Image: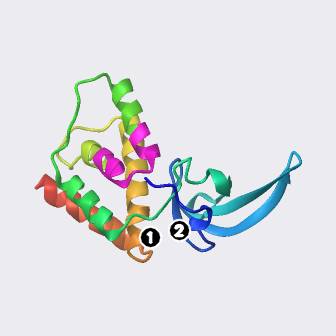
Amino acid sequence: MTKMKKNEFRPNDYVVYPAHGVGQIVSIESQEIAGIPLELFVISFEKDKMTLRVPTHKATEIGMRSLSTPDVVSKAMTTLKGKAKVKRAMWSRRAQEYEQKINSGDLIAIAEVVRDLHRSDDQREQSYSERQLYEAALERLTREVAAVSGGDEILAAKKVDEVLVSRAA
């Protein structure tokens, strides 16, 4: 990834913050912290009722990025159609990998988690932790698909679900 100009992000832009998913930049403010003037992005994650302040000079470094392009979204959808890859590793190790993918902020990696943990109705039950990871990944994917396509989360969820169901058939 190329180093971007510091003001690549602007107020009202939707961005993806690796550990929290899609948020919206509300404003850019200056604060003095320990005597050092800092410029901060104020990012609102409405769904989580959370506001985050991120130093503008650190944003790209920590992996904050613009929403995926429609092209990346369709790649993610194609990923969902793929066959689930379940490694034979211990669950704790797999769970850790899934968690890293979810928090990477990488839409394709998130789609892989959704694909690998998706269960159709006739498949075995998911454990509580599997379900938690699946839902976290699904929510990240759905929110970004929605934001890219104009904001309708219900529509986006339907779209993702249709892909998963068609795959299971």
Looking at the rendered structure, the kind of residue marked 2 is: Tyr
Name the residue tied to disc 2: 14
Give left or right: position of 35 versus 116. Answer: right
Local packing at callout 1 (Cα closer than 10 Å; few below 14, some 14-19, many 20+) is some
**Element under disc 1:** helix
Looking at the rendered structure, the kind of residue marked 1 is: Ala
Q: Is residue 141 magenta?
A: no
Q: From this view, report whether residue 67 is shown above or below residue 86.
A: below
Quarter-wise, where is residue 143 in the image? bottom left
Q: How is the image coloured?
A: rainbow
Q: Residue at x 65, y 54 (%)?
A: 57
Residue farthest along the top direction in this orientation: 90
Residue 52, given in percent of the width and then of the height, sits at: 67, 55
Residue 77, given in percent of the width and then of the height, sits at: 25, 60
| Residues rendered magenta in the picture | 99-113
Residue farthest along the left direction in this orientation: 169
- How many badges with numbers are in the image? 2
Query: Decide: marks 2, 1 in contact (CB < 8 A)?
Result: yes
Q: Magenta stretch: dominant SS?
A: helix
The mark closer to the camera, 2 or 1, is 2
Residue 111, given in percent of the width and then of the height, sits at: 31, 52
The disc, 2 or 1, on the residue closer to the chain's N-terminal end is 2
**Element under disc 2:** strand
Name the residue tied to disc 1: 147
Q: Residue at x 63, y 50 (%)?
A: 58
Q: Residue at x 53, y 47 (%)?
A: 19
Quarter-wise, where is residue 104 in the image? top left
Give left or right: position of 41 versus 137. Answer: right
**Can residue 128 be seen here?**
no
